[in-house]
Image: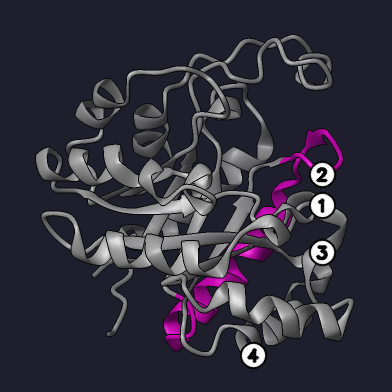
Amino acid sequence: MKMRDNFWLWGHPEGRFNELDGYKEALEFKKSRMTPMEACLYLGVRNTFMIPMGVPLDRRQYNKSFTTLRQVGWDTYKASTDPTALDPFIAEAKEFPNISCVVFDDFQRENKYKNMKIEDLWECQRRLKEDGVRPLDMWMVLYTNEFGLDKEKDEDFARYIEPFDGIIMWTWKESDVPLIPEKWELFKAMTPKNRRMFGCYLWNFGDCKQATAKAVKWQLDFYREQILKGEAEGVVLHTNTMADLDYEAYDAAIEWMNKHGDEEIPF
């Protein structure tokens, strides 16, 4: 398997940030039109998570555009309190064989997870494994600023991690990138039985400005080392909605992928 085979896009509806307050000014009123599938091709990755961000869309239309990808996953945060929300994804997986998983985005945001029932998460896990044409995986998004600050909270949160097949570690602000090695050690201790991936922002959402090529390259080099060690399985690049606006971080990611994307992962 090649390195690019384990890289994902974090996809949004095209143009999602073009008119959003707080972003359109930061984007210098540039208009993005790149679709998630176009971004996969542009960035050289083979998988995507699709996150609608509250926008009504035709999932079938997107799934058809993704047919040449290895794996596709969809956000299904609503299933955390209502496992029946998984029904359409389980049904769509029958027609689209590359649908492999669902993801719970922003799992800890505003401590909403505390209103979830652990048994509902386990029911989601059971349904994904048993009720469809094949087993589907369940992933969670967890940010580095959400753990390692309160030991008691981390110990309590462990029970929410257990039902998930995999956890994706993200860093919200580029200024926190230097903390990643330390946070990674804590993250590994928190996820002893889970699969692991990294998230990498190609636009600095935490500070609402462009990401730097230096920070992106450093992250990808560090993440590559962990993949080659067998401690993580992939990286998720965020996102298509700035990919065609001529930002240096995207150029750095493409340059990195051209250099490392066809490396063979030895296991």
Is residue 216 highlighted in magenta?
Answer: yes
Residue assigned mark 4: 189
Q: Amino acid at mark 3?
A: Asn
Residue assigned mark 1: 173
Q: Please tell me whether mark 1 sits on a helix, a strand or a loop.
A: loop
> Residue placed at 82% from the left, 44% from the top?
206
Task: Check contact, mark 3 vs mark 1: CB within 8 A.
Answer: yes
Residue assigned mark 2: 206
Segment colored magenta? 204-232
Residue assigned mark 3: 145
For marks 3 and 1, give the CA distance: 9 Å
Residue 176 spot, x, y in % from top left: 84, 62
Q: Please tell me whether mark 4 sits on a helix, a strand or a loop.
A: helix
Question: In front: 234, or 64?
Answer: 64
Residue 93 can be seen in this image: yes
Residue 97 spot, x, y in % from top left: 13, 47
Total marks drawn?
4
Of callouts 4 and 2, the N-terminal one: 4
On-image quarter of the N terminus: bottom left
Of callouts 4 and 1, the N-terminal one: 1
> Residue placed at 20% from the left, 38% from the top?
92
Task: Check contact, mark 2 vs mark 1: CB within 8 A.
Answer: yes
